[in-house]
Image (cartoon, helix red, strand yellow):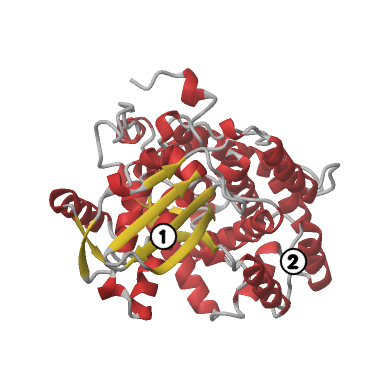
Amino acid sequence: MAVGVFDLFSIGIGPSSSHTVGPMRAAAVFAEELRASGVLYRVAGLRVDLYGSLAATGHGHGTMTAILLGLEGFHPELILPDEVEQRLAAIADTGQLQLAGSVSFPYAVKDMILHPLTILPRHTNGLKFAVSDAAGEVLHQATFFSVGGGFIVREGEEDAAQQQLEESKKELPFPFRTAAELLRHCQGNGLSIGEVMLVNERESRSEEEIREGLLHIYSVMESCVAVSLKREGLLPGGLKVRRRAPDWHERLMKEDKDRDPKYWQEWVNLIALAVNEENASGGRVVTAPTNGAAGIIPAVLYYALHFAPGMEEATQSDRDDVVVRFLLTAAAVGVLYKEQASISGAEVGCQGEVGSASSMAAAGLAEVMGGSPAQVENAAEIAMEHNLGLTCDPIGGLVQVPCIERNAIAAAKAINAAKMALWGDGSHRVSLDEVIVTMRETGKDMSSKYKETAMGGLAVNVVEC
């Protein structure tokens, strides 16, 4: 199917969409295939191989434990944080996982085989599963790639998947791969960018279902913040990074009881930090479009709902409209990055995660603040242009430093980009398509040290303890 809004905004667990959500999803698919093929009860041996970035930073990203949960049949969009803790504790205590939720099988993180210096041809985030019977005969095997944002691709099916994608796009009323095509649809039909996305989404679900689904997505974002503000102490993982969101919230509640506009950036920072601290804790978040960049869109949407002109007298229905329009517009821009480049930090660096999220958020804000399609496209372009070359070099392979602060900085960039675009008439020298292509080419040229391998940048220049 063509990439849609609920592909780009999906619910999962932290800390990483490509290293946690994708591998769990792949493992769950493999477990379902074991059950469906009838070989589950003949399994005597299980082998899991991780390649490239998954192997290099998997421990810090929770990749191995996510795979164990997937092999038990859990899906990232359905599992709850309490279930994660309960099942991982049980596996650690017994050394047994429940393969496909049915067969007790001796397997643990230590049994996985890591190949950090081996990159499979399709993508740096590769993982292989194989099961065998008591005689050693392979019963079933599969190779997957976690390509960013929780999306997975199966080896051998890449061309078929791409062909299916292209065919499904032809069925859409307004198919687009580039910003130029998107703008032509807007101009030719008198629609905003969000409205073009809505018309396409209506091909697969009703408008009411779309609205309810997007409001649910935002409710999960809000819940993520609320849970994070109740947590205190240090983030897990050994870096001894202190949670700041609860203290910041307490201070803001004292200093800004009436939501003075002069505090807008402090509130935006707070929301971004809270979401990403919860993500770093392995909590429930919305990939937007990735977990590593999950705080940007909620933070900018918070700005739209609380500080944008005219929101003081807005009804709840008006506020819901803002949420829906914002997310639809952001998703339309997200499609452009999925189609023309990548949202995977392991493939193009953090410009593909934080950069694309900042671009999407800028577009969403520009739309709900009354921007024309040309101004919205300009806002998205400005935000990405000033995230080009952003590396992915998390210390210890953990989605904490510099990831958490980086979300707050990128949220402010998105707001500034939207304001700059709205002060113009939509005409500008550099197009969004040109910037997206530049991001893709920059990612290809970027050393692998700076693409989620923890082999360069802050990851090697900052002492972990």
Q: Amino acid at mark 2?
A: Phe
Q: Amino acid at mark 1?
A: Phe
Q: Residue at x 65, y 64 (%)?
A: 194
* Place of residue 188 in the rendered image (x, y in percent of width and height, measured from the top left): 83, 71
User: Which corner quadrant holds the C terminus?
Assistant: top left
Q: Residues within 10 Å of mark 1 (few under 14, many from 20)?
A: some
Mark 2 secondary-structure assignment = loop
- Depth order, front residue of 56/391: 56
* Place of residue 39 in the rendered image (x, y in percent of width and height, measured from the top left): 33, 76
Q: Residue furthest left?
A: 93
User: Quick check: can you spot residue 391?
Assistant: yes
Q: Residue at x 61, y 37 (%)?
A: 413
Q: Nearer the viewer, mark 2 or mark 1?
A: 1
Mark 2 or mark 1: name the one nearer the start of the chain.
1
Q: Residues within 10 Å of mark 2 (few under 14, many from 20)?
A: many
Residue located beneath label 2 in the image: 176
Residue located beneath label 1 in the image: 129
Q: Residue at x 48, y 48 (%)?
A: 302
Q: Which mark is residue 41?
A: none
